[in-house]
Amino acid sequence: MSTDQYAVLGKTPGLRELEKLSFDDVHLTINGLEAGYGKMVILHDLNLMIGKAQSLCLVGPNGAGKSTILHSIYGFTKINAGSIKLGNNDITNLSPNEKLKNAGIAYILQDASIFPKMTVEENMLMGGFLMDTVAHAKEAAEKVLAKYPSLARRRNQNAGVLSGGERRLLEISRALIMNPQILLIDEPSIGLEPRFIDMVFEILKDLQKTEGKTIIMVEQNAKKGLEFADIGYVLVSGQVARVGLGDDLLKDPDVGRLFLGG
């Protein structure tokens, strides 16, 4: 589809509209962000707000900048203008390690990121590489494994023998070692069978509702992502074209026609 075909989505939403969706309990704010890779600018004057323990799904066509938003929050892009704030603290220029250790932000990659020749437990310990001691990492890993007994039973097996769903669970579990408050998740359902997709979203729902994690995700299955998320943002050409509650965007005829096959 050409950019013109997305014009029906309308103008960029205002800051007040974004703030209302976060229920005035803003956890993370992006304001006027211009970012990209090298000389290539992907995001243009982008704004985003999400409240504590909310979930937000980014949808849009390929190349719209969805993953670039996650990369920018975590410190993987070149930021030319704008700011990223955690509460009142500016975290725009923190490194990825500082985002994880000091700002409580973890990033779960789209691409398979486990180490197949290492055991499940060894993979888990890699999630604590920024901790002061190995003992602290082991203690944190035990707490996470206690939450997911199916993974704990396979702790001594090489991660390469895990099913696709189990690998995704391991990636999520490893990200929890540092006890982050914000999870950035790129394509949680990619490459998974339907039964594992449901399992992954149930895990994410539990992390949000039970543990109070704030979740920002990109999801190729826009319908599944919007069904899960409290808030949805529709991106076109590096800008936010429409926002709304996830349920409302699912019912939106323009969003349905463009992204949901309706």
Image: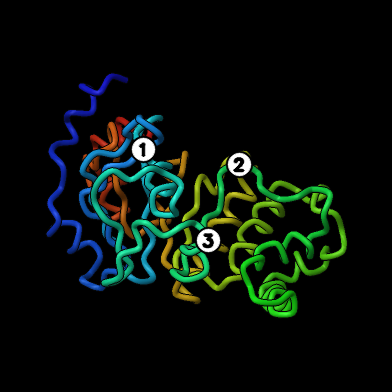
Kind of residue sitting beneath label 1: Gly
Q: Residue at x 52, y 55 (%)?
A: 107
10 Å neighbourhood of mark 2: few (<14), some, or many (≥20)? few
Disc 2/disc 1 C-alpha distance (Å): 20 Å
Residue 36 numbered mark, or none: 1
Other-residue count near label 3 (Cα within 10 Å), few / some / many at <14 / 14–19 / ≥20: some
Residue 99 x/y as whole percent: 46, 63
Crowding at mark 1 (Cα within 10 Å: few <14, some 14-19, many 20+): many
Query: Would you place residue 194 above or below residue 210 in this image?
Result: above
Q: Mark 2 points at which residue?
A: 111
User: With 98 as the anchor, is 15 left or right in this view?
Assistant: left
Q: In which quarter of the image is residue 118?
A: bottom right
Please give the name of the residue rendered at 79% of the width and 65% of the height, measured from the top-left corner: 121
What amino acid is labelled 3 in the image? Answer: Asn
Mark 2 and mark 3 lie on one chain; the one further toward the N terminus is: 3
Instruction: Please report the residue visible at 62 percent of the width from the left and 39 percent of the height from the top.
Output: 191
**Mark found first going from the N terminus, 3 or 1:** 1
Give whichever of 91, 182 is nearer the camera.
91
- In the rendered structure, are the residues bearing label 3 and label 1 in contact, judged by CB atoms less than 8 Å apart? no
Looking at the picture, how far across and down is residue 155, in whole percent? 82, 65
Residue where numbered disc 3 is placed: 97
